[in-house]
Image (cartoon, helix red, strand yellow):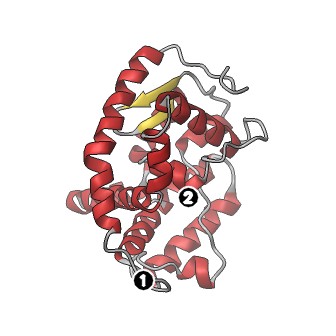
Amino acid sequence: MQDGIRVNDPYEAQNRRVHAFNKGLDRTVIAPVSNLVSSGEKAPGQTGAMDLVINAGSNLSLPGKVVNSVLQGRPEPAIKNFFRFAVNTTLGMGGLLDPAGKDFGLPEQDTDFGETLAVWGVPEGAYLELPVLGPSTQRDAVGKVVDLAIDPLYHLLHRDGAWAAFGLRVASKAGERARFGDTVDSVLQGSADSYAQVRLIYLMHRRHELNQGGAEIDPYADTAAQDAIDPYAE
């Protein structure tokens, strides 16, 4: 147990070694790049380049979320994400802008194959920290792999286009890392035990997201900030 949260971490020694690698990578590569991106951020009231990249990356994730909602037997979020993708891809200049959310009342309905597995009754499994990808569980690690395999865009686009889409989604996560840099730094670099803190944040946030945890939510467990800690979270 950690702060009243059930923790299944039989691979803690290995996870801590991976965490040390990820923490060093964030300090020496990811954070400096993110700070470089944020240094040219927009003036108040304007849409900056970082916002455009984040919007585009988020838009590219929507077809996969449509598929997952269908697999979960949830037609309403599937329909909303489908129309959000259609509106932002056409009226939003390929997803750079977000008229679907601002003008049509179609916010993103977040989901992934890890949630699909949870809906199907697959247990969470042990906690894992993955190289570069960050905190996860055995169930969510499988989900990350399957999400790439079932994403319609990667099957419809030419190979170069698929790689470009993937790169844009990674850049979108770097933008989110920049946007919530202070929060992420306080966890990764400012905690006495950053591994335990990241583990707690991830498990609390994820279980709450899947309605499988308690009602208490850690103050750091803001969805967007969590996405910045977990660079491939969708």
Mark 2 secondary-structure assignment: helix
Task: Give the answer, above or below, for where 115 lies relative to 8.
Answer: below
Question: Which residue is at a point 40% across and 60% down the rendered structure image?
Answer: 178
The picture places residue 121, in percent across and down from the top left corner, at: 68, 30
Between residues 29 and 172, which one lies in front from this camera angle?
29
Q: Which of marks 1 and 2 is nearer the N terminus?
A: 1
Q: How many numbered discs?
A: 2
Q: On the image, which quarter does residue 181 sit in? A: bottom left
Q: Are marks 1 and 2 in contact (CB under 8 Å)?
A: no
Depth check: give the residue in front, 91 or 167: 167
* Mark 2: amino acid: Val
Residue drawn 76% across and 40% down? Answer: 216
- Could you tell me how far apart the alpha carbons at marks 1 and 2 are, in whole angstroms? 34 Å
Residue reaching furthest right? 215
User: Looking at the image, which residue is at 28% across and 54% down?
Assistant: 32
Q: Which residue is drawn at 42% across and 22% down?
A: 15
Furthest-left residue in view?
160
Which quarter of the rendering shows the N terminus?
Answer: top right
Which label sits on residue 194?
A: none
Q: In this view, does 195 lie above or below 146?
A: above
Q: How crowded is mark 2: few (under 14 residues within 10 Å), some or many (20 or more)?
A: many
Q: Position of residue 214 (x, y in %)?
A: 77, 36
Left or right of 167 on screen, residue 151: right
Callout 1 amino acid: Ala
Query: For mark 1, does the 10 Å Cα neighbourhood hold few (<14), some (14 to 19), or many (20 or more) residues?
Result: few
- Kindly identify which residue carries mark 1: 43
Which residue position holds label 2?
A: 66
**Residue 90 left/right relative to 164:** right
Q: Given this view, does label 1 or label 2 mark the residue nearer the observer?
A: 1
Task: Report x, y in % for residue 110.
Answer: 59, 56
